[in-house]
Amino acid sequence: MTWEEFQDELARRRAAGRPVRFWWRDDDAGAVSFELKKLLVLSRDRGIPLALAVVPEAAEPELFGLLHDGVAVLQHGTDHRNRAAPGEKKTEYPAAEPIESALGRIVDGLGRLRAFAGGKLVPVLAPPWNRVRPDLLKKLPAVGIVGVSGYGARASAEPAPGLRQVNTHVDLIAWRAGRGFVGEVEALSLATKNLAAEEPVGWLTHHAVHDEASWKFLERLLTLRDVRWLSAAEAFSQNL
């Protein structure tokens, strides 16, 4: 898949009355860094909404003063600590942990983000490593979490009553192959594969580990026409 082929597909869908919807989530925000500032400037200058998944315990207060009007804050776990048992995939929410402990940690993180982010907070949990135990999901609406965001095709738009799920589908980082850019062909092919899904196509970035190729791809992606970029509030609206 080339850029030209991808752009042609977007144009065909728009002409057929099926315009493509994208949304953008960036993970692991917390410390103020050159890379984070670069990300925010790129979002601002291109006029593209950004959902910034912030780790509450890592968040520096100065971060929130840098956010422009197009940035929404999501909750990226609480401490991003891997609590997985031996043989279990990385997760902040292991199966063996008492559910009250996991829920209490989420509540603490939500309160911290609400205090710092104010109206920029969209109470959506983007769990570290995109993993959250299923029995925890039904508890989230009662503590103020209205959405959850993972990776890959979602099984349901509403995994629990009162909880909206909108995932990401294209991660720009090849985590198992050197942590560099996943590649233009792979990224565009993944996006094309998900164009027909009911949910908007989610682009996942990790500003702290972007190499030059990742930034270059992202910069070009944000110039695409024939697509509508949704804010986090729009993406998690029950009307979609």
Image (cartoon, rainbow, N blue to C red):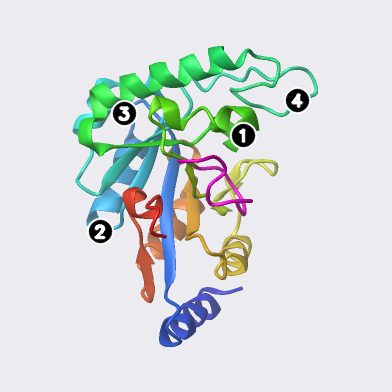
Q: Which residues are magenta?
A: 149-162
Looking at the picture, how far across and down is residue 29, in whole percent?
A: 40, 32
Q: Which one is in front in this view, the residue at disc 2 or the one at disc 3?
A: 2
Amino acid tagged 1:
Arg
Q: Secondary structure under badge 4?
A: loop
Amino acid tagged 4:
Glu
- Residue occupying image coordinates x 47% and y 16%: 105
Taking 199 as reference, is 36 above or below it?
above
Q: For residue 131, which numbered disc appears in the image?
A: 1
Q: CA distance from mark 4 to mark 2?
A: 40 Å
Amino acid tagged 3:
Val
- Residue occupying image coordinates x 44% and y 82%: 11
Compare marks 3 and 4 and give the one earlier in the sequence: 3
Looking at the picture, how far across and down is residue 91, in whole percent?
A: 63, 26
- Of residues 14 and 171, the one nearer the viewer is 14
Q: For residue 109, which numbered disc appears in the image?
A: none
Contact flag, marks 4 and 2 (Cβ < 8 Å): no
Furthest residue in direction front, as rendered: 161
Compare marks 3 and 1 and give the one earlier in the sequence: 3
Quadrant including the C terminus: bottom left
Compare marks 4 and 2 and give the one earlier in the sequence: 2
Q: Is residue 158 left or right of residue 232?
A: right
Q: CA distance from mark 3 to mark 1?
A: 25 Å
Amino acid tagged 2:
Gly
Q: Which one is in front in this view, the residue at disc 3 or the one at disc 1?
A: 1
Residue corresponding to mark 3: 32
- Residue occupying image coordinates x 44% and y 32%: 141
Q: For residue 88, which numbered disc appears in the image?
A: 4
Looking at the picture, how far across and down is residue 4, in whole percent?
A: 50, 79
Compare marks 2 and 3 and give the one earlier in the sequence: 3
Compare marks 4 and 1 and give the one earlier in the sequence: 4
